[in-house]
Amino acid sequence: MPLIEFLGYTEAEQAERVEKYTELLRDLPYAHHTIFCITQKSSIIAVSGKHKPFLRVSSRYKDRISDMLEILGEHEDIEFSIIEYAESKLANSK
């Protein structure tokens, strides 16, 4: 389940990107598992003082990260990480 987080964007900028990126990613075989994390406005400021928004993409699968970099990389700066996932037995027993 790839996770795309927006860092340094207003809520309106995030909503605009979700719409755009949903369209760009819709043909991926795992598109229905891709999720976006929308937050209230955040600011990312470099030491130089320059506003520096970017995407953070996380997934358990390296090939999915590669897909995201290829598709979204021309539009945004991207930080990415390969993660591990531990499913909760208690949460899934309800």
Image (tube, helix red, strand yellow):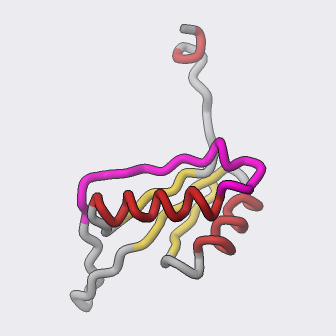
Instruction: Establish if 87 lies above or below 14.
Output: above
Locate residue 91 relative to residue 68 in the image: left or right: left
Question: Residue 41 lies in what quarter of the image?
Answer: bottom left
- Image quarter where the N terminus lies is top right
**Residue depicted at x 54% and y 13%:** 90
Which sits in the foreground, 20 or 35?
20
Instruction: Establish if 81 lies above or below 32.
Output: below
Question: Residue 32 lies in what quarter of the image?
Answer: top right
* Residue 49 % position (x, y): 22, 87
Q: How many dots with numbers?
A: 0
Magenta stretch containing residue 31, yes or no?
yes
Magenta stretch containing residue 77, yes or no?
no
* Residue 15 % position (x, y): 38, 57
* Residue 4 % position (x, y): 51, 56
Locate residue 63 relative to residue 73 in the image: left or right: right
**Residue depicted at x 67% and y 63%:** 65
Q: For the stretch drawn in magenta, what is the main secondary structure?
A: loop
- Image quarter where the C terminus lies is top right
**Residue at the bottom extreme of this rendering:** 48
Magenta span: 26-42
Which sits in the foreground, 78 or 23?
23
* Residue 16 % position (x, y): 40, 63
**Residue depicted at x 34% and y 66%:** 13
Locate residue 32 relative to residue 37 in the image: left or right: right
Question: Residue 48 lies in what quarter of the image?
Answer: bottom left
